[in-house]
Image (spheres, rainbow, N blue to C red):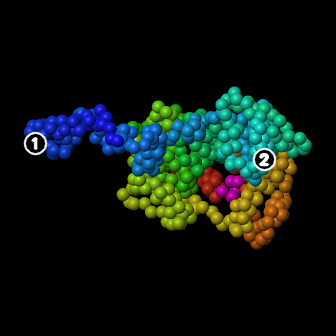
């Protein structure tokens, strides 16, 4: 049976009153249409003229069944936001910690780096002085049980293992460990604590006086981490720098600005943003940067986005250093995170950003069509853009000139000053099979187990190289291992891929040492065409480098 509520009775009366009032007002506002006059009157009466709000209110008040409005909102808001630009997003309260952790620079956990090469949790490295280190966990240990739950051999997804190992600082977790040379499981209790998340993934002297820094994100700690790394490299003899932003999808805008400030002289424009009202906020270098004269190569690729593009664009547009690699992603939108009382948040695009020459590098998108936007990188690949710069076209209207006379373009990412195509020349069917089936990686885990004592003693890149150089039969031993695991040798293809396989074997073994990612990048770079081109670039006479300007 239909029941008249107080609101149901009042609404038609107020609507009628609004119409009458609108007609009366129309005598004095003849230039306005009846529709606009009614809208103004209804808004003045605070009636539900917003269709979405009104619909939600009707459902809450009139729908035959009941539904928690919070539940309905959780379903509706993501659909609503998906009709905006590709980078606005709704973050449920349950996802906030996971989303914010990389940007906050820390999380609560036990302090290990692990992998599941098969169905076993293998500890690759233990963070020095961290919770697991203090409890006696060692690199190479296998985690058999977490508390009372068996995890070895259970094929548990890696993200579920992460959730079991993490927890509030001060809480405890019991681990049962399998350790080489020990017959019985080793039982330890780890007290969880704060674990830093690093933005600087790797930093070392890559060759002679050239420093290499791999930056994985722009988090709260990024500026401090980078300047600390540069200070360390300077003490080790660095006079030139390769800054690797490949795969770096961005983060905090202010960190990109602070990093650009380190390399630019006073007065250089770094970036400016413009909102819907065309109000601009401009950021300039203040002259306090300590690395203004450091010869610099910045590496980018199609996964470099947002803050990475702000930094690369600021340096490129001010003729500072050289941008090397492939065209970047093309994200020129700025998001503001707005919290809800329940702990969820809306990341809403509120402005565009522009490089110093006035370039918007946001690639084109259609409002509400996120699928096409996500397919854009695949379209680049299909159009051969990863392999030849001639496949990339920019409209002449997007052309800009830097102060030094260099031509740059907006409208779809940062185009590098020196394009380096993707190199697939050493990739054979044999290599694809041994890497795709994870055989190559599993070999390095077993190799590390056999040489654990020697690898754990490594303290520098030079020591690691010396250790691995002594193993002249590494690739041949791996080929025999792959044959035992079902991949028949093809010696013609092995000869073609030998250099690539050897670099990857050494790199993964290097990551199984206390050097962690330094051990990886120090061994992989000889087959990385972008890094080797950057080394050659920095080796050129100083007069060939793009000049700084006043």
Q: Which residue lies under the disc numbered 2?
A: 152
Residue 527 colored magenta? yes
Asked whether disc 1 touches disc 2, contact meaning CB atoms under 8 Å apart, the reply is no
Q: For the magenta stretch, what is the residue range?
A: 524-528
Residue 236 colored magenta? no
**In the rendered image, which quarter is residue 172 located in?**
top right
Tell me if residue 466 comes above or below residue 263 in the rendering.
Answer: below
Dot 2 crowding, Cα within 10 Å, few <14, some 14–19, many 20+: many
Number of marks in picture: 2
State left or right for residue 204 relative to residue 319: right
Residue 251: x and y in percent read: 53, 42
Q: Residue at x 19, y 38 (%)?
A: 16
Q: Main secondary structure of the magenta part?
A: helix
Q: Which residue lies under the disc numbered 1?
A: 30
| Tag of residue 291 | none
Q: Nearer the viewer, residue 406 or 254?
A: 254
């Amino acid at each position: 049976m239909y029941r008249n509520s107080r609101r149901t009775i009042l609404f038609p009366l107020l609507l009628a009153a609004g119409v009458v009032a609108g007609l009366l007002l129309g005598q004095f506002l003849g230039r306005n249409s009846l529709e606009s006059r009614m809208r103004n009157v209804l808004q003045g009466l605070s009636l539900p003229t917003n269709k979405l709000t009104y619909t939600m209110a009707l459902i809450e008040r009139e729908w035959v069944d009941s539904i928690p409005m919070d539940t309905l909102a959780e379903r509706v808001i993501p659909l609503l936001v998906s009709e905006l630009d590709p980078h606005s997003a709704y973050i449920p309260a349950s996802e906030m910690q996971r989303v914010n952790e990389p940007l906050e620079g820390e999380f609560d956990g036990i302090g290990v780096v692990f992998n599941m090469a098969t169905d076993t949790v293998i500890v690759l490295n233990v963070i020095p002085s961290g919770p697991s280190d203090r409890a006696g966990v060692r690199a190479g240990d296998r985690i058999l049980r977490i508390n009372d739950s068996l995890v070895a051999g259970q094929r548990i997804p890696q993200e579920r293992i992460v959730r079991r190992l993490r927890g509030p600082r001060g809480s405890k977790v019991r681990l049962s460990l399998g350790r080489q040379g020990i017959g019985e499981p080793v039982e330890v209790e780890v007290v969880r604590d704060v674990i830093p998340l690093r933005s600087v993934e790797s930093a070392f002297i890559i060759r002679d006086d050239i420093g290499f820094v791999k930056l994985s994100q722009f988090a709260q700690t990024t500026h401090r981490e980078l300047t600390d790394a540069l200070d360390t490299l300077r003490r080790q003899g660095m006079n030139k720098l390769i800054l690797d932003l490949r795969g770096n999808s961005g983060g905090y805008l202010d960190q990109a600005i602070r990093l650009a400030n380190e390399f630019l002289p006073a007065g250089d424009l770094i970036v400016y943003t413009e909102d819907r009202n065309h109000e601009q906020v401009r950021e300039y270098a203040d002259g306090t940067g300590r690395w203004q004269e450091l010869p610099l190569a910045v590496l980018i690729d199609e996964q470099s986005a947002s803050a990475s593009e702000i930094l690369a664009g600021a340096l490129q547009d001010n003729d500072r250093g050289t941008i090397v690699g492939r065209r970047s992603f093309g994200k020129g939108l700025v998001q503001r995170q707005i919290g809800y009382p329940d702990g969820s948040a809306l990341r809403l695009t509120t402005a565009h950003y522009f490089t110093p020459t006035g370039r918007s590098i946001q690639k084109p998108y259609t409002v509400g069509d996120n699928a096409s936007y996500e397919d854009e990188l695949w379209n680049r690949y299909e159009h051969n853009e990863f392999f030849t710069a001639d496949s990339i076209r920019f409209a002449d209207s997007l052309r800009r000139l830097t102060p030094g006379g260099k031509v740059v373009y907006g409208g779809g990412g940062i185009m590098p000053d020196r394009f380096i195509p993707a190199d697939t020349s050493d990739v054979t069917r044999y290599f694809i099979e041994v890497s795709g089936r994870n055989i190559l990686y599993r070999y390095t885990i077993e190799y590390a187990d056999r040489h654990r004592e020697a690898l754990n003693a490594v303290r520098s890149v030079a020591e690691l190289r010396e250790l691995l150089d002594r193993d002249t039969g590494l690739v041949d031993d791996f080929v025999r291992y792959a044959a035992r695991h079902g991949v028949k040798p093809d010696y013609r293809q092995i000869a073609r891929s030998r250099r690539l396989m050897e670099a990857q074997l050494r790199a993964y073994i290097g990551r199984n040492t206390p050097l962690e990612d330094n051990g990886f990048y120090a061994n992989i770079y000889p087959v990385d065409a972008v890094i080797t081109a950057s080394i050659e670039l920095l080796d050129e006479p100083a007069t060939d480098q793009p000049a700084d300007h006043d």
